[in-house]
Image (cartoon, rainbow, N blue to C red):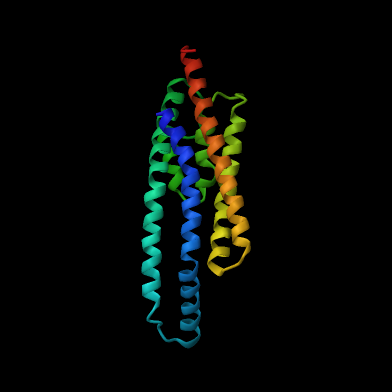
C-alpha cells in the first residue's frame, strides 16, 4: 500500500487546486446567495432564485468530492495497515488502528488523533517523527487557510488570490511531508522486521 499512499499524497495537490478553483467558480453564486439571504432576512420575503443558486453549489460540491475521495480512501487504507503493522511490532500507540482511521471523521478530535495515529506508526524517539509533525502542521494550517481563502473568494476580496497561492504551497508541503512520512514508516517497519 505504501506506493499508493505516496501517490495519494501527490494527488492531494490536485485536490487543493481543484477545491480552490471550485471556490473561485462559485464566488458569484455564493455572493448571490449571501445577497438573497440578506434581502430575505430584512424583508421576510422568500427569494425565488435562492434554490437555483444552492443547486449549482451542490453540483460543484459533488465534483469536489469525486476529486477528494480517492485521496482519503488510499490514505486511510494505508494508515490502517501501517498502524496494524506497528501494533504487531509492539510499537506503543495512543489509539487503535480503527480509531486512528475513524478519527479523521470525528469533529474536534480530528485535529490531533490522526496525527497521533500516524506518529505512533514510528518507534518512539525516531527522528522521522518530525516529518509527521511537519506534515500535520501543514495540514491543519491548510484547513484554516482554506476556509479563510474560500470566504475571501466568495466575497470577491482580491486577497483571496494571495491566500490561494499560500494554500497551494501548504498543500505541496503537506504532500511532500506526507510522502516522506510514508517512506519513513515503511523503512522503519522493514528495519524492525529485519528486512533491511
Relative vertical location of residue 170 with respect to residue 154 in this rendering, above or below: above
Judge left or right: residue 3 versus residue 146: left
Viewer-proximal residue, 142 or 115?
Answer: 142
In this rendering, position of residue 158 left or right of residue 77: right
Residue 125: image location, x then y, percent: 62, 24
Q: Residue at x 45, y 86 (%)?
A: 44
Q: Position of residue 189 (x, y in %)?
A: 48, 20
Q: x, y (%) of residue 90? A: 47, 21
Viewer can see residue 9: yes
Q: Nearer the viewer, residue 191 or 84?
A: 191
- Foreground of the two, 18 or 69: 18
Please count the marks in the image.
Answer: 0
Quadrant of res 88 = top left
| Residue at 59% across, 61% down | 160
Q: Residue sitting at 50 percent across and 49 percent down? A: 16
Q: Is residue 96 visible?
A: no
Q: Quadrant of the N terminus?
A: top left
Please give the name of the residue rendered at 46% of the width and 82% of the height, measured from the top-left corner: 40
Nearer to us in this view, 187 or 176 = 176
Q: Is residue 13 above or below residue 47?
A: above
Amino acid at each position: 500500500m505504501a506506493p499508493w499512499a505516496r501517490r495519494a499524497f501527490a494527488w492531494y495537490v490536485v485536490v487543493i487546486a481543484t477545491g480552490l478553483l471550485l471556490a473561485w467558480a462559485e464566488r458569484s453564486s455564493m455572493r448571490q446567495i449571501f445577497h438573497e439571504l440578506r434581502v430575505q432576512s430584512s424583508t421576510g420575503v422568500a427569494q425565488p432564485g435562492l434554490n437555483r443558486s444552492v443547486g449549482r453549489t451542490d453540483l460543484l460540491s459533488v465534483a469536489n468530492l469525486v476529486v477528494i475521495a480517492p485521496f482519503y480512501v488510499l490514505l486511510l487504507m494505508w494508515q490502517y495497515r501501517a498502524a496494524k503493522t506497528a501494533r504487531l511490532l509492539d510499537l506503543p500507540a495512543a489509539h487503535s488502528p480503527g480509531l486512528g482511521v475513524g478519527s479523521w471523521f470525528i469533529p474536534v478530535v480530528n485535529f490531533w488523533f490522526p496525527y497521533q495515529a500516524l506518529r505512533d506508526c514510528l518507534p518512539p524517539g525516531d527522528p522521522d517523527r518530525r516529518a509527521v509533525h511537519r506534515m500535520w502542521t501543514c495540514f491543519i494550517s491548510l484547513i484554516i487557510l482554506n476556509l479563510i481563502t474560500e470566504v475571501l473568494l466568495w466575497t470577491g476580496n482580491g486577497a483571496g488570490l494571495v491566500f490561494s497561492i499560500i494554500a497551494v504551497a501548504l498543500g505541496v508541503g503537506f504532500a511532500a511531508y506526507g510522502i516522506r512520512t510514508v517512506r519513513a514508516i515503511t523503512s522503519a517497519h522493514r528495519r524492525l522486521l529485519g528486512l533491511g
